[in-house]
Image (spheres, rainbow, N blue to C red):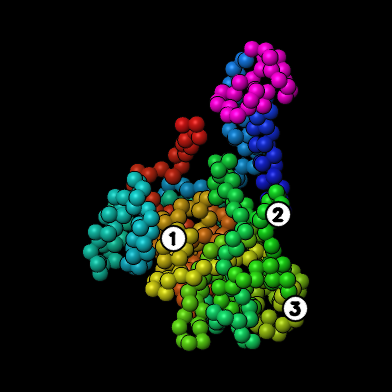
């Protein structure tokens, strides 16, 4: 609700800024078309028929359209600090062959940008089946490392995991397959706040129009109620509500159909409500111990408490909508728009770490102290991925990947690799809308 209050404040300020000139313009007779600058009567300040000579008054740019109020600006989440290659932990121990392949997937998007065209071309020119040392040399010769630093100047953060699950389902409802996978509703409205305030890049509000008002979209409890407000938008039906819940957390998956074929579904949109952790809610309400709050532990609790599970799932108001993807893809599609690569793609907070870039990640394997130092590629985002040193490690498809992903909550450090000569901290020049 807070985000919608903020939206209405923005809308109200803009309306006030524009309403004054519009009212004065209506003093003209007739007010068919008012070219800028608007003609304003020298004597009348209210809407009456003007008889005095017309004085041309320029319209100042409303303050609200120049810079947002302090409360509306995006807080600093972290920064990138120039580093040396020697600071990357065990850089030479990793075989970056798969990382190069994943990065070349990113280049299908990045190569159109001036700062990336040369390094993408050089990466494509690396001979196939090159030795790891040759690929490492490519990265060292074409990139510079930048240490990722949190807003509080710390350099470590949380690394979690995700994967592409396999669910059992059908394209039609049956007695077994009765839990709907919804496609994106047509009445879901998105408002890009950066269109009004450039400082609020990546900020988006979602809702639905009721009368002449933008209202919050349906929460999970409303969508999954007996009223079924999204009836008719079913993309498929699955046999397990808990598996569907975790499909939404993962953001993509495959559905095994009765005829043996598979249907791949990917993230289409989200209802605009914040993500709330089911595991955290179970811990706070003494339903589960913290050490058992993994994905497997939560599923086990759900099997033992079928009467409680919907109540607890409703604590998370966030709801994800899906679209069907081609079965020929090598992996699910991430936010960047390219297929993800198992154990080489990560989800990041793109307000600090640019999408598409190589990222050297230093962490440990799930529930161990065994080092996991690996060159990854930032190709995805997530509702729970918030902060500079924060990553979600994509483990791939299937149960084995799910086992790793469900147990992963490790400490880690990150270095972003950027093309030589590119300064990520250079001031961003935002073109004036009047140009």
State the extent of the magenta-drawn residues as a range: 26-53
Q: Residue at x 32, y 67 (%)?
A: 97
Q: Secondary structure at mark 2?
A: strand
In this picture, is 193 found above or below 293? above
Q: Nearer the viewer, mark 3 or mark 2?
A: 2
Q: Secondary structure at mark 1?
A: loop
Kindly identify which residue carries mark 1: 337
- Bin the neighbour count of mark 3 within 10 Å (Cα to Cα): few under 14, some 14-19, many 20 and up: few
Kindly identify which residue carries mark 2: 210
Q: Who is closer to the viewer here, 420 or 249?
A: 249
Can residue 164 be seen in this snapshot? no
Please give the label number shown on residue 243: none
Dot 1 and dot 2 residues touching (CB under 8 Å): no
- Bin the neighbour count of mark 2 within 10 Å (Cα to Cα): few under 14, some 14-19, many 20 and up: few
Q: Where is residue 40, by image quadrant?
A: top right
In this picture, is 93 found above or below 179? above
Q: Residue at x 75, y 81 (%)?
A: 307
Q: Who is closer to the viewer here, 396 or 86?
A: 396
Residue 4 pos. (x, y %): 69, 50
Give the CA separation, mark 3 to mark 1: 37 Å
Give the CA separation, mark 1 to mark 2: 32 Å
- Bin the neighbour count of mark 1 within 10 Å (Cα to Cα): few under 14, some 14-19, many 20 and up: some
Give the CA separation, mark 3 to mark 2: 33 Å
Q: Secondary structure at mark 3?
A: loop
Dot 3 and dot 2 residues touching (CB under 8 Å): no
Q: Who is closer to the viewer here, 31 or 240?
A: 31
Kindly identify which residue carries mark 3: 308
Q: Is residue 314 left or right of residue 247?
A: right
Q: Earlier in the sequence, mark 3 or mark 2?
A: 2
Q: Earlier in the sequence, mark 3 or mark 1?
A: 3
In this picture, is 296 found above or below 96? below
Q: Residue at x 58, y 27 (%)?
A: 34
């Amino acid at each position: 609700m807070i985000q919608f209050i903020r939206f209405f404040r923005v809308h109200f300020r803009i309306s006030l800024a524009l309403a004054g000139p519009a009212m004065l313009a209506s003093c003209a007779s007739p007010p068919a078309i008012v070219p800028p600058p608007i003609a304003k009567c020298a004597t009348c300040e209210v809407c009456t028929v003007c008889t005095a000579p017309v004085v041309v008054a320029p319209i100042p740019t409303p303050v609200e359209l120049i810079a947002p109020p302090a409360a509306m600006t995006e807080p600093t989440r972290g920064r990138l600090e120039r580093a040396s290659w020697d600071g990357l932990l065990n850089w030479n121990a990793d075989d970056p062959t798969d990382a190069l392949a994943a990065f070349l997937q990113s280049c299908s998007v990045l190569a159109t940008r001036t700062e990336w065209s040369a390094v993408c071309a050089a990466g494509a020119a690396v001979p196939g089946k090159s030795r790891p040392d040759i690929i490492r040399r490519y990265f060292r010769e074409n990139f510079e490392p930048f240490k990722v630093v949190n807003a509080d100047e710390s350099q470590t953060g949380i690394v979690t995991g995700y994967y592409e699950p396999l669910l059992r389902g059908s394209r039609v409802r049956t007695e077994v397959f009765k839990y709907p996978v919804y496609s994106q509703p047509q009445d879901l409205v998105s408002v890009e706040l950066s269109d009004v305030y450039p400082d609020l890049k990546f900020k988006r509000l979602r809702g639905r129009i009721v009368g002449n008002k933008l209202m919050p979209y349906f929460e999970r409890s409303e969508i999954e109620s007996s009223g079924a407000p999204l009836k008719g938008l079913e993309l498929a039906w699955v046999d397990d509500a808990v598996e569907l819940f975790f499909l939404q957390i993962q953001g993509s998956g495959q559905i095994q159909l009765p005829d043996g074929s598979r249907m791949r579904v990917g993230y289409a949109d989200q209802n605009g409500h914040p993500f709330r952790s089911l595991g955290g809610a179970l811990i706070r309400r003494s339903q589960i111990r913290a050490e058992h709050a993994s994905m497997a532990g939560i599923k086990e609790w759900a099997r033992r408490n079928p009467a409680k599970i919907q109540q607890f799932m409703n604590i998370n108001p966030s709801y994800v909508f899906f679209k069907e993807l081609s079965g020929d893809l090598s992996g699910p599609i991430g936010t960047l728009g390219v297929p993800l690569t198992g154990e080489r793609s990560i989800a990041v907070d793109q307000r600090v770490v640019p999408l598409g870039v190589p990222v050297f990640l230093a962490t440990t394997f799930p529930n161990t102290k065994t080092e996991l130092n690996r060159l990854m590629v930032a190709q995805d985002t997530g509702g729970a991925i918030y902060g500079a040193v924060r990553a979600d490690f994509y483990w791939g498809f299937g149960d084995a990947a799910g086992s790793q992903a469900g147990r992963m909550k490790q400490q880690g450090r990150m270095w972003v690799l950027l093309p030589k000569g590119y300064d990520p901290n250079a001031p961003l020049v935002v073109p004036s809308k009047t140009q």
